[in-house]
């Protein structure tokens, strides 16, 4: 039984980091005029109304995207991020928040493809209604980690893979690491972006230990903590663990996080961009 619904969290500080860095990754991949595939293992509903009961109950977007909405002179990554959200809204009012598939859809070139997985019945239906009719997009109702192994290596031999589970079950951390290691054996040049929360630091780091010990090269940590690690206060940090980041993504992430830290830090947090495994 899946209880997680991304609608409660849409546009929170973790989404700001995840989606702005995802957009920059696509942009860097698009510097080469060759087709690519985007694989989303945990796609969500595709878009969220910030006025609905989910978002209003938590108000998380108020501590995330809303803090950037009216800011002038944003760094480039956040400028594109906000501009895409305005495009999705069709206005300057922050009423809707796009999910990862919608952000990618707004930046898909004619020769690119998307493969989206979502297991939750209601969210799959919403996603399928929004994007399922497009011949460049495949919407699959099923387990995303299994789907990932079936989808690689892609014919294009170029791809960005977002792995964005809800980590509802403790074993999810290990399952993600195992699936990525298997997928990397089949498709070693793919860009793997693993989103992660820090709720209990040791759980998250155990997943990274598996990845670091796997022999896979080029692993980059991009992390934003809004509070110090704690056993009591829920998600204190979140980030992206990126395998094979395109050239200069590390510098872009540093500039982006340097801007976000003073804006979103709730006291005692930190940001970091660290090469955990090099060439
Ligand atoms: N990637 C989305 C975004 O950035 O907008 C958010 C995804 S949300 C964090 C995680 C999603 O994974 C939820 O919609 C949940 O229903 C779905 N999910 C949970 N277990 C899954 C599984 N095994 N395979 C595919 N989707 C799953």
Image (cartoon, helix red, strand yellow):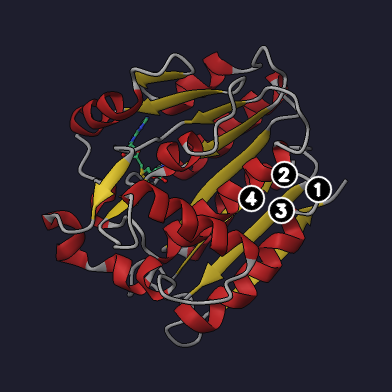
**Residue at the image position 41 percent from the left and 49 percent from the top:** 87
Q: Nearer the viewer, residue 214 or 122?
A: 122
Q: Earlier in the sequence, mark 2 or mark 1?
A: 2
Relative side of 55 to 194, left or right:
left
Within 8 Å: ligand 1 and the Cβ of disc 3? Answer: no
The Cα–Cα distance between marks 3 and 1, rounded to whole angstroms, is: 12 Å
Q: Which of the two labelled residues, at mark 4 and mark 3, occupies the earlier sequence position?
A: 4
Q: Residue at x 24, y 34 (%)?
A: 123
- Seen at 19% across and 34% down, the residue is 1
Whole-angstrom CA distance, mark 2 to mark 4, is 6 Å
Circle 2 is placed at which residue position? 28
- Circle nearer the viewer, 1 or 4: 4
Which quarter of the rendered picture does the C terminus lie within? top right
Give the distance between the C-alpha atoms of the residues marked 2 and 3, in whole angstroms: 16 Å
The label number, if any, that marks residue 34 in the structure image: none
Q: In this rendering, is residue 13 above or below 245? A: below
**Horizontally, is 37 left or right of 29 in the view?**
left
Residue tagged by mark 1? Answer: 247
Mark 2 and mark 3 lie on one chain; the one further toward the N terminus is 2
**Viewer-side label of 2, 1:** 2
SS at mark 4 in the image: helix
- Compared across the picture, whether 240 is left or right of 33 comes to left
Label 1 environment density (alpha carbons within 10 Å; few <14, some 14–19, many ≥20) = few
Residue at numbered disc 3: 220
Marks 4 and 3: which is nearer the front? 4
The quarter of the picture where residue 160 lies is top right
Q: Are marks 2 and 4 in contact (CB under 8 Å)?
A: yes
């Amino acid at each position: 039984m899946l209880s997680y619904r991304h609608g409660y969290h849409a546009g929170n500080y973790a989404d700001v980091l995840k989606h702005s860095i995802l957009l920059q990754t696509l942009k860097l991949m698009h510097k080469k005029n060759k087709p690519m595939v985007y694989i989303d293992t945990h796609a969500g509903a595709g878009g969220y109304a910030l006025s609905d009961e989910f978002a209003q109950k938590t108000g998380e977007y108020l501590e995330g995207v809303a803090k950037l909405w009216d800011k002038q002179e944003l760094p480039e990554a956040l400028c594109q991020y906000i501009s895409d959200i305005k495009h999705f809204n069709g206005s300057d009012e922050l009423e809707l928040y796009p999910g990862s598939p919608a952000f990618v859809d707004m930046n898909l070139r004619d020769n690119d493809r998307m493969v989206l997985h979502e297991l939750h019945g209601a969210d799959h239906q919403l996603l399928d209604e929004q994007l399922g009719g497009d011949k460049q997009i495949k919407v699959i109702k099923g387990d995303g980690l299994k789907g990932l192994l079936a989808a690689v290596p892609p014919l294009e031999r170029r791809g960005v893979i977002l792995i964005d589970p809800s980590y509802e079950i403790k074993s999810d951390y290990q399952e993600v690491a195992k699936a990525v290691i298997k997928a990397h054996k089949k498709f070693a040049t793919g860009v793997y972006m693993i989103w992660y929360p820090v709720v209990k630091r040791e759980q998250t780091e155990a997943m990274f230990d598996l990845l670091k010990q796997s022999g896979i090269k080029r692993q980059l940590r991009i992390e934003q903590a809004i509070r110090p690690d704690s056993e009591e206060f829920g998600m204190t940090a979140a980030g992206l663990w990126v395998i094979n980041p395109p050239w200069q993504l590390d510098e872009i992430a540093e500039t982006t996080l340097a801007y976000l830290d003073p804006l979103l830090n709730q006291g005692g947090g930190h940001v970091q961009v660290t090469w955990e495994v090099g060439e």
